[in-house]
Image (cartoon, grey):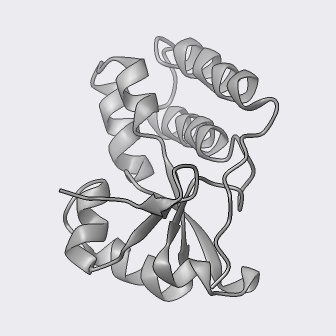
Amino acid sequence: MSIPKYIPHPNREKRINSAIVAIKALLPLDMYLAHKKELLSTCIWKITEADGKLKVRYWSEGALSASSKDLRHEHVFERRELISRLLSGENIDSVVNDAVGCLVTKDEHTVLTLSVASGWNRYKDCGIMVFDSEKQEWLKIN
């Protein structure tokens, strides 16, 4: 099993801040709700992919030994949940902190989409262990 080492993209903060600027601009606009949600979804993608689509900090146990064609960039807190929180007026920084990507296998992604839990609890409920490639240790999900 090859254990990756997390290396932040040199423009990580600029990329995230750019998406936050866009979120702040979009939220007060009087626009068709479906379009607003789609644009906010794109902003969330930009945040979770700030280091690159496959260069994320968190990896499932299965992803550590999978081929790149079997990997999926998964949103730990689902985008629709994050969008709903933004639209409800929740603090943007709080929502952005939960915009986290994790690499999983295609099969794990399918299982995760069936979970009714939220965030890391989806992984716990599905029995998916997660490796933190920055700290080089398994994530403890309480």
Q: Which residue is pictured at 35% across the width and 25% down the height?
A: 94
Q: Which residue is pictured at 57% across the width and 50% down the height?
A: 134
Q: In this rendering, would 95 be left or right of 4? A: left
In the rendered view of the protein, which quadrant contains the N terminus?
bottom right
- Please say if 42 is above or below 85: below
Question: Which of 64 and 29 lies nearest the eye of the viewer?
Answer: 64
Q: How many marks?
A: 0
Question: Which of 59 and 46 lies nearest the eye of the viewer?
Answer: 59
- Please say if 60 is above or below 14: below
Q: In this rendering, would 46 be left or right of 84? A: right
Q: Residue furthest right?
A: 10
Residue 31 placed where, x, y %?
Answer: 52, 23
Residue 142 placed where, x, y %?
Answer: 17, 56
Q: Residue furthest front?
A: 136
Q: Which residue is pictured at 53% across the width and 14% down the height?
A: 24
- Please say if 79 is above or below 29: below
**Res 43 → quadrant:** top right
- Please say if 109 is above or below 117: below
Residue 38 placed where, x, y %?
Answer: 56, 42
Residue 97 placed where, x, y %?
Answer: 43, 32
Q: Which residue is pictured at 38% across the width and 30% down the height?
A: 95
